[in-house]
Image: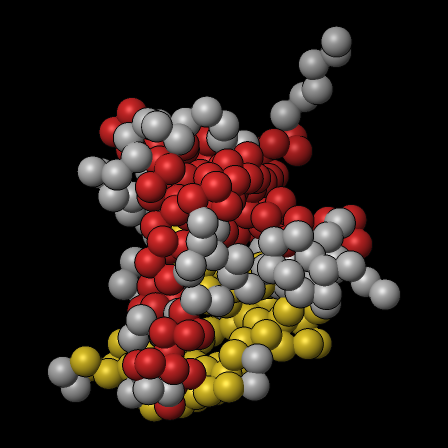
Amino acid sequence: MRAEHPLTGRSDVPASGSQLVADAGASAIEVRDLSYVVSDRAVLSGITFNVGRGEILSLMGRSGSGKTTLLKCLGGLLRPTEGSITIKGTDIARMSEIQLNRIRLRIGFVFQYAALFDSLTVFDNVAFGLVQHRRVGREDLRQTVRERLADVHLEGVEDLYPSELSGGMQKRVGLARALATNPEFLLYDEPTSGLDPVTGRAIDDLIVETRERFGVTSVVVSHDIETIMRISDRAAMIEDGRLLTVDTPAGLRRSDHPSVREFIEPAINSESAGAQQPRVRS
């Protein structure tokens, strides 16, 4: 009998990252014929794809292509004009606001630039969702906040304010806040935006580590092709509100679609340049 996962409390998720393999055959999220129209302008049109249980799926494309709008639809923050979004067998596009609120409790958002409350300490930022939506005793709250900060490799910062943190630390606090409510799904909006390459890679590693430790299904919006190639099981390319392709990083590298080639070319060139550099003997 498989033990319950320490964060989600679910027995269907292995606690050990070494045992976790994304199961694209077991869909956690199914999107069918999704469209979103604003003032007669189609922001999204006819989007169809699945996200496997425990998968990291990235949404990539140019600025204004509709990636963040799609992410907000997946999280129930925007209601699509047409189509369905089925999460664990339930179409959230047809839910009432009260029903949606219950679904949102199972979804953690990691916003661009962290979106922390400037007037709250790190402790109160991480605890915010629990205080608002759960009945948690003070000591349990303290323990949960400490554990979630430790999960993102931050300790001893509970009494600091966001202005006292670096950009990378703020991103980690944002992830700790998202994890505090024990989500089954994590939605990331440009998690490495505004970070230097070294800190960006550390956030990439943390996204993968979080999936492996807690079994969460993750959707990541990013324009950073190196991040996409590094962390994704698959990636979906959005152009002008339409889905061009969904493929693995290896499949994207082999793609002959002009828009895909143009978007991923910097990553391919970077990999080639790295491979051609002479080794330095130690």
**Residue ranking furthest to the right:** 1
All told, the count of numbered labels is 0
Q: Residue at x 24, y 83 (%)?
A: 37
Residue toward you, 118 or 233: 118
Q: Is residue 2 left or right of residue 55?
A: right
Q: How is the image coloured?
A: secondary structure
Rendered position, 257 above or below 181: below
Which quadrant is home to the C terminus? top right
Residue toward you, 149 or 277: 149
Rendered position, 207 above or below 58: above
Quadrant assignment, res 102: bottom left
Q: Position of residue 204 (x, y in %)?
A: 53, 42
Q: Position of residue 20 (x, y in %)?
A: 74, 57
Q: Residue at x 36, y 53 (%)?
A: 131
Q: Position of residue 133 (x, y in %)?
A: 37, 62
Q: Is residue 1 left or right of residue 247?
A: right
Q: Can residue 181 be seen from the camera position used here?
A: yes
Which quadrant is home to the N terminus? bottom right
Q: Residue at x 67, y 21 (%)?
A: 278
Q: Is residue 101 left or right of residue 143?
A: left
Rendered position, 93 above or below 17: below
**Residue ranking furthest to the top:** 282
Quadrant assignment, res 166: top left
Q: Can residue 202 be seen from the camera position used here?
A: no
Quadrant assignment, res 221: bottom left
Residue toward you, 208 or 97: 97
Q: Position of residue 55 (x, y in %)?
A: 62, 63
